[in-house]
Image: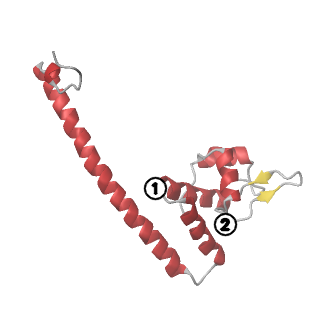
Amino acid sequence: MLEVKPSSEEIPEAGVSIAEAAERTGVSVHTLRYYERAGLVVTTVDRTSGGRRRYRDLDLKWIGICTRLRATGMPIRTIREYADLVLAGAGNEKERLALLESHRAEVLTKLAELQENLQLIDHKIDVYRGRLEAGTADTLWFPGPTG
């Protein structure tokens, strides 16, 4: 599993508050609550006798996975599907693998597109640097009115 943000302290057996969980995972309190409501959390987050959430190490690790999947563009519904498969337990590993492989292919496509876009940006930077060094930057294309 992915690691949550490093902390100088271990997570106590009783868990941590939602505020500390937010700090450790790098997501907002609102996002943590949303992940629970949306069915993305595969564990049942414990609660104190007063009803306050207490997140354990496993909860934080799973939230880290969800956050990473979301950051790669995986839709919430697909993360929920993955979480449902995990919750169902053994026997659906092929489905989990297929879901992750499909998403990986999508991420690779996006990375290739980003790489192409980055090449264009690098080219434009080179043009601007060259023109600025040559003192001809004022001849770069400008869409304003002519003369």
Tell me the quadrant of the picture where the C terminus can be found.
top left
Q: Nearer the viewer, residue 11 or 97?
A: 97
Is residue 144 positioned above or below 36 on the image? Answer: above
Q: Position of residue 140 (x, y in %)?
A: 16, 25
For badge 1, the amino acid type reads Thr
Tell whether 79 sits left or right of 44: left
Q: Position of residue 65 (x, y in %)?
A: 55, 59
For badge 2, the amino acid type reads Val
Label at residue 16? none
Residue pointed to by mark 2: 42
Q: Nearer the viewer, residue 141 or 92?
A: 141
Tell whether 111 sits left or right of 141: right
Mark 2 neighbour class, 10 Å CA radius: few under 14, some 14 to 19, many 20 or more: many
Q: Residue at x 22, y 33 (%)?
A: 125
Return the residue found at the far right.
49
Q: Position of residue 102 (x, y in %)?
A: 42, 70
Q: Is residue 58 visible?
A: yes
Residue pointed to by mark 1: 72
Q: Position of residue 121 (x, y in %)?
A: 26, 39
Tell me the quadrant of the picture where the N terminus can be found.
bottom right
Q: Residue at x 66, y 62 (%)?
A: 41
* Quarter occupied by residue 88: bottom right
Q: Residue at x 66, y 59 (%)?
A: 38
Q: Is residue 10 visible?
A: no
